[in-house]
Structure formats: C-alpha cells, structure tokens
Amino acid sequence: MNRLIVISHRAPDPAGLKDSGGMVVALKNAMQVHKGIWVGCAPTTREPDQPDIAQLDFFHGDAFDIAYYHLSEDEHAGFYTRYSNSVIWPAFHGRLDLIDPEGNSFATYNNVARKIAQALRPHIRPDDLIWVQDYQLIPVAGHLRALGVRNKMGFFLHIPFPARDVIMAIPHSQIMLRGFCDYDLIGFQSKRDIEKFSIALRSLLDVTPDSNNRFQRGGRTIQIGHFPISIDVEEFSRFAHQNGNHCVEGGSKGIIAVDRLDYSKGLLQRLRGFRQFLADHPEHYGQVTLTQIAQPTREHIPAYRSLKTEVEQLVSAINGQYGGVEWVPVHYVNKRVSRERVAGLLRSGKGCLVTPLADGMNLVAKEFVVAQDPADPGVLILSMFAGASEELSAALLVNPYDTGSIAAATERAISMPIEERRARHADLLKAVQSNSIGDWSRNYLAALQAQAITTAPQPVEFRPKD
C-alpha cells in the first residue's frame, strides 16, 4: 500500500483533543488506513525574531505523523485572511461584492505554497501518494512539480466551484486555473461543480475534457472526478443516542439549525423565512421554536463581524414582534457547541433547516438524518444549492432566496404525517449509509492510484504575469 501524504491548512491536534470539522474528521479516517504524513499549518505563527526556515516540525504518532509548517503573522494574514478567505472564499460562494484583493495578497498566497513544497520535498518517497486539500493550497502541486516531484498528486475542493463569469472576476483567475492542471486527479463534491469546472476550462484555458472527464494540458493527462464527502455514520449515530438528553427548545415542534456564522450559510434568509412562517401561521404561536446554533468563525474579517450584527438584530426583531413572556420563537446560540452535544440536539429536532446559499456539501444535513429515530423521525429541509441535495433528494428541497419557500417547507415539516416522515427518512438514511466517510477517501485514493504518471516537459509556473 502506498504511503499517503495529506497537505491541508488545518492539521489534527497531535493529542487528538481539539479536532473538529468535516474535513479533519474525514481525513483522519484515511490517514489511519494508509499511514504516512499529514502536513498542516502550525497553530501559532512564527515570532518575528525567529528565522524563516522552510522546514517541517514532526510529531510522530502510532497511525501517522503530523508535520507542521510555520508562517509569520504577515504570511498568515496575506495567505489565509486576505487571499484565501477574502478573495477565493467569497468568489467561490458567489459573493463577488465581498472580494477584498488587498495589496500583494496573491503573491503571499503563492509564496506560502512554494514554502510548503520546499519544506516537504526532502520527505517525499518515490511511491508516495500526495493529496492536497482545498482552496487555500491550489498552487502546491505546481511548486512540487518545479522541484522535480513526479509522484501522483491529487487535489480535492471541499467548497463549491463557481460559474465561469465569477471565475473571470477573480484576480489572477487564469493562473489559478492553470494551477489546478498540475494535479493528476481533481475531486469535487458535486456533479454540477464538475460541469462548471469543465466550462471554465473550455472558455478560459481553451481545454476540452473528453466524455470521461479527462483533459490534456502541458503533456499531462488530468482526470476530473465527483467524490461526495460524508460522515462516520456509526460514530455520529452513537453520539446522538448517548446525548439524547440535550433537547432543542420547543419540544415536539422544535426546529434545529446548526451552522458556522458564515454568509454562505444563508442565516439571514433562513431567519426571514422563519419570520414569514410565523406571519403566515399564527396557529403555531407559542409552539414552534427555531434553535439556531451559529458557531463563531473568522471574526477578524469585517464581513463576518457585519453578518454577526445583522443576524443578532434580526433575531431580536423576530423575538420582539412575535415572542412573549412564556415563548421566544428564535433561540439563538452564538458560541461553540461540542460535536457530541450537537448530535443530541439534532436527534431531538422535528425539523432541520439547512439552507446555504452555496455549499460544497454540508455535512449537517447528513448528520441530522443519521441522528434521527427511524420510528419518529424529523424532516430535513435542504437548500437546492447545497452539494448534499444531489444525494438527499428525499428532503424538502427549497430555494433559500425565497422566504416563501422556506416558510412553506417549515409548515409542511411541522404538519407532515408520520408515514411520510418515515418513508422520507428511510430514503435519506439509505443514501447516507451507502456513502459513508470511509467510502469517500477509498474511492478518491483508488482513482488517484489508477492514474498513469505522465511526463510533462516543464510545469506551468504559478505566478502573476509581469
């Protein structure tokens, strides 16, 4: 079995105490099978008086090693805050109005990728599989190729891929697209992401994938693939059973929503939809409560601070208009909640609102399905713009931009007969169980191993034009 090298912005905690998030959980499963090295950013930035040395700090574990690369505060700000999360993230989620291409952030983004490649190069064996994760690290393969690395390299995009016109608006977008082409296998969450990527290749790089989603560039063959990420079904089901004492507000008519406080998750649109539900159905006053968990994230970025203020104001307005002494329609929680406790809350929800405006997958939708009691399941209300909607078609699919759609689905979920709830849940559970967390990594790595190594005369340099 080939050794696996995973490269991501976040790496697991060596003690295993602070791990959270779908990507870390999913990749730990793959690393425990394949062994190898997980390369990620050190949790603290390098002090100004420390030398800038391109090397990795290793923590040796029983199953796999963790290797940290170190960044200065300025490097992290330019690479992570200013380019990854203030240019790529908003653009890939369709928010061109939030792009903030400050200064030389692209140059820093590219230089960090070069630094990672230089630090990793001495530790790569000829038969290692290299798997780079997500939008923060697109150019890593190009720099490794420039250092002579011919190993099979894969890339997986955990977030959605945008439409062609959005790509065109991103600073250095063609250079970014060329960076994708240094990989042997590019994985996406959904089929529609493959379609949008293919359109971008044809129109912006003049490259046309064939009927098997392969294309040629620079003397190399690159494969595009659809690999929907998932969850550990058995583990999350166990969490839900063990934490069933944690119940949402509203009892038998409690609605649950769990998100990071991110503009891509559609929190404002969801709250407006719930307000419309209350306006349309006064018979539910005093009965139906929405528990919205909005876990803090990227609070140093202005767009996130503004969103927090808007959400809090809207929650206050809804509760002020419709609530009373004995009933508050929106129970809002803006703090981190453990994965175990979330599982218990999801189990007790009679409905779950998962309404992102754009999402690569959205694992909360799958977690809600797994957490439910099949004998008396709740109803999943899911945005058609979440990658999960391709697998979970038995959910109530809504347009998150349409408050009436959210309001009508909420009423339908609350009123749905148990026979229909059971039938829908059975279909949803079957879909989740048929593609669990281990299937995602196994399918991807099998496809990467199957790729033939092709020789390119020289990789395309991933750098801005003069």
Image (cartoon, rainbow, N blue to C red):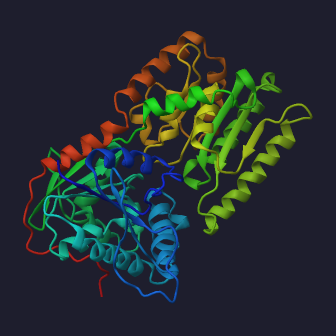
- Above or below for 253 versus 68: above
Q: Residue at x 42, y 42 (%)?
A: 387
Left or right relative to 281: residue 169 = left
Q: Is residue 404 visible?
A: no
Q: Position of residue 187 (x, y in %)?
A: 29, 50
Q: In this view, does 136 lie to the left or right of 277?
A: left
Residue in front for this viewpoint, 261 or 39: 39
Measuring 30% from the left and 70% from the top, which residue is drawn there?
A: 139
Residue at 71% of width from left, 52% of height from top? Answer: 311
Q: Position of residue 371 (x, y in %)?
A: 54, 28
Camera-side residue: 237 or 189? Answer: 237
Quadrant in the rendering for residue 207: bottom left
Q: Give the percent coordinates (x, y) of residue 196.
A: 32, 52
Residue 370 visible in the displayed image: yes
Among the 4 quarters of the image, the one containing residue 292: top right
Q: Is residue 147 above or below residue 390?
A: below
x and y, in percent, of residue 373 in the image = 56, 19
Residue closest to the far top = 419
